[in-house]
Amino acid sequence: MEFSTILIIIAYALITYYLVSRFLPVKGLENLRPEQFKERVNQKSKVLLIDVREPHEFKTGHIPTAVNIPLSQLNNRVKEISMKNDVLLYCRSGMRSKQAAKILKKHGFAKMAHLQGGISTWQGATKKK
């Protein structure tokens, strides 16, 4: 087998692994439709709502009770999140919130849910900062 063929096979394997790891469900993460997510947000007791978008995105509009902890800072700020709370995560489209759940799971969090489709599917009130 030629060296270039081996490189192409390796490249395809790496791309496949990357795509599968990004799109597979995260164990312990509930995928909530917008109306389910809104119900959970409105429960307020023992719920922490985290927007994992970057600060400039958060300022353009966020769910009023949300705390902004960007995915890029989550590992360093995980101590700000109480394990006593159910953690609700959202981002723009749902991809970063899944990644955030993976990080939180590594830190021992078990009760997590995220907004399928991200804030673009949210039909409740938003607040601009």
Image (cartoon, helix red, strand yellow):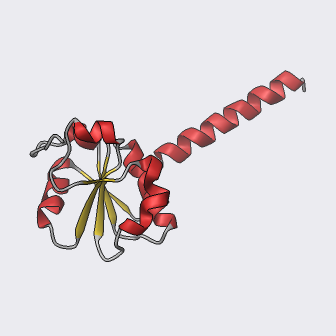
Observer-nearest of 7 and 74? 74
Quadrant of res 11 = top right
Query: As displayed, is residue 52 above or below residue 3?
Result: below
Q: Position of residue 10 (x, y in %)?
A: 75, 34
For the question of whether residue 27 can be seen, the reply is no
Observer-nearest of 91 and 114? 91
Q: In the displayed structure, does residue 107 sit left or right of residue 63?
A: right
Quadrant of res 19 = top right
Q: Position of residue 83 (x, y in %)?
A: 36, 74
Query: As displayed, is residue 76 above or below residue 8?
Result: below
Query: As displayed, is residue 78 above or below residue 89?
Result: below
| Residue found at the far front of this picture | 129
Q: In the displayed structure, does residue 27 sit left or right of residue 68?
A: right
Q: Position of residue 33 (x, y in %)?
A: 22, 49
For the question of whether residue 72 can be seen, the reply is yes
Image quadrant in which the N terminus is located: top right
| Residue found at the far bottom of this picture | 84
Residue pictured at 31% horizontal, 59% vertical: 113
Residue pictured at 52% horizontal, 65% vertical: 106
Q: Position of residue 25 (x, y in %)?
A: 44, 53
| Residue found at the far left of this picture | 125
Observer-nearest of 24 and 56? 56
Count of labels shown? 0
Q: In the displayed structure, does residue 112 sit left or right of residue 108?
A: left
Image quadrant in which the C terminus is located: top left
Quadrant of res 91 = top left
